[in-house]
Structures are given as structure tokens and as C-alpha cells.
Image: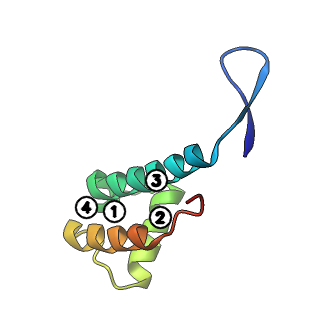
Amino acid sequence: MQVSFDGRMPAQRQVTFTQNQLYQLFEAMKSIALTHIQYSSVYDRKPSYVSEDDQSIYDLCEAHGVDIAYSKDRIAFFKAVLDGMENPYA
């Protein structure tokens, strides 16, 4: 996979990811998602503004009867979901 991006240098850069790097990136994103779901205070009580990503988490919990304000319920649900997601780069 190749991606292009504008870094700190004025020239656009292009990098190529190996299959192993894509695997590691996917696993890191799953871990980061679970950490956010576990430690973000936005789920303890719904603030007046909720980002689009966090609203998706609210919607998934509501659709599946998960008590989002109860961290054990929320974390168990998303841990099961993320553990069940096969890494497409394996």
C-alpha cells in the first residue's frame, strides 16, 4: 500500500507500507480505539457536543443494548467486537 502526504517539508512524500507494517498499524488502531473507549470521560455523561466518532460509539451501544455509561459493559462489548475483527493484513 502506498500513501502520499504533506509532511513538514514543502515537498509531498510517498511511502510504501509492507504487509507486516499494515498488520501492526491495524492492531495499533484497534488498541487505540479500545483505550479511548475505556478512558474517555465523554461516555460517563453525554456532553452537549459529541464528536462524530464518539456519536458512532453511542449509536452502536444503543443499538445493541449496551449501557455506555457503565464502563464494564461498554469495554466488554467493544473488546469482544475488536477481538472478533480479523486483521485483513494477516
Q: Nearer the viewer, mark 1 or mark 4?
A: 4
Percent x, y of residue 25: 52, 47
* Residue at mark 1: 46
Q: Is 90 displayed left or right of 7 in the figure?
A: left
* Residue at mark 2: 55
Q: Is 70 displayed left or right of 9 in the figure?
A: left
The mark found on residue 27 in the picture is 3
Q: Secondary structure at mark 1?
A: loop
Which quadrant of the view contains residue 75?
bottom left
Q: Measured along the vertical axis of the image, is residue 7 above or below residue 83?
A: above
* Residue at mark 4: 44
Residue type at numbered disc 4: Asp
Q: Nearer the viewer, mark 3 or mark 4?
A: 3
Residue type at numbered disc 1: Lys
Q: Is 86 displayed left or right of 48 in the figure?
A: right
**Among numbered discs 3 and 4, the one appearing first in the sequence:** 3
Q: Nearer the viewer, mark 2 or mark 1?
A: 2
- Label 4: few (<14), some (14–19) or many (≥20) C-alpha neighbours in 10 Å: few
Which quadrant of the view contains residue 74?
bottom left
Percent x, y of residue 5: 72, 31
**Among numbered discs 2 and 1, the one appearing first in the sequence:** 1
